[in-house]
Amino acid sequence: MHDFMPRLYAIADAAFGNPVELARELFDGGARLVQIRNKNATSRELLGQVVAVLEFAPKDSRVIVNDRADVALLSGAGGVHLGQKDLPPQRVRKILSSDQILGFSTHSLSQALDSELFPVDYIAAGPVFPTSTKTDADPVIGLSGLREICSRASRPVVAIGGITMENARDVFGCGAASIAVISDLLKSRNVARRTEEWLRYNSEICGSPWTSTS
């Protein structure tokens, strides 16, 4: 699964609007890895939203479901992303198909090292900077914390938390394979255009918007 880790990991967060429409705009702008996050949805609502997104998602894209392994499995999504308080990755891996991605959030070096024992395809590390998208956000790890995690992790690291175009170069410089972006994309009046801008910038600083060097 490691060969599919675009530099931009876009998240369609329901806190910013209808995640289905947000995902459509992200894909229209060129994103190819989109996570559907809707913390307050019922199981039925979230399943319906993910299925709706999968109907228009480009063939060369992946749709990841936040938290809900059951929804990822039932919908046939590209994978699931788990947090520290979600189901154990070892159990979730057993119910996913072999081609579905399993991601896992870490918020410290110790959590990142613990994840080395888990059957996950990538880890997220953060928050790198202060973020407004989580009211119960973990302590900021900063660039130094991200750099240490990237240097020790054997799997691709997705940096998350308060990342903008202004600090993206520094984040990639720490060794991150990809950057998860929420606010800097979804707060834009034109999400598709902002996504295009991100991909052009990624191409300028990394050489390619689609592939990682990790």
Image (cartoon, rainbow, N blue to C red):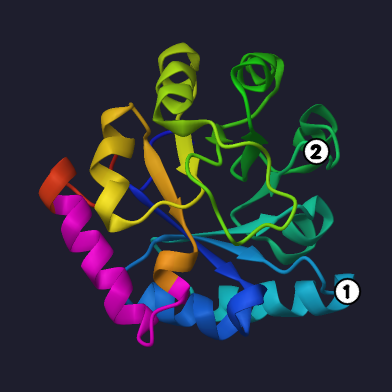
Residue sitting at x 47%, y 81%: 24
Residue sitting at x 79%, y 51%: 69
Say above or below: 63 vs 19. above
Tag on residue 42? Answer: 1
Find residue 198 and report its image quarter.
bottom left
Query: Which amino acid type is shown beneath numbered disc 2?
Result: Val
Which element type, helix, strand or loop, lies under badge 2? helix
Tag on residue 92? Answer: 2
- Residue closest to the eye, 100 or 82: 82
Say above or below: 110 vs 61. above
Q: Position of residue 3 (x, y in %)?
A: 38, 36
Q: Position of residue 9 (x, y in %)?
A: 44, 53
Residue sitting at x 35%, y 48%: 6
Dot in front, 2 or 1: 1
Magenta stretch, overall SS: helix
Q: Position of residue 110 (x, y in %)?
A: 66, 15
Q: Residues within 10 Å of mark 2 (few under 14, many from 20)?
A: some
- Residue closest to the eye, 202 or 73: 202
Highlighted range, magenta:
186-203
Q: Earlier in the sequence, mark 2 or mark 1?
A: 1
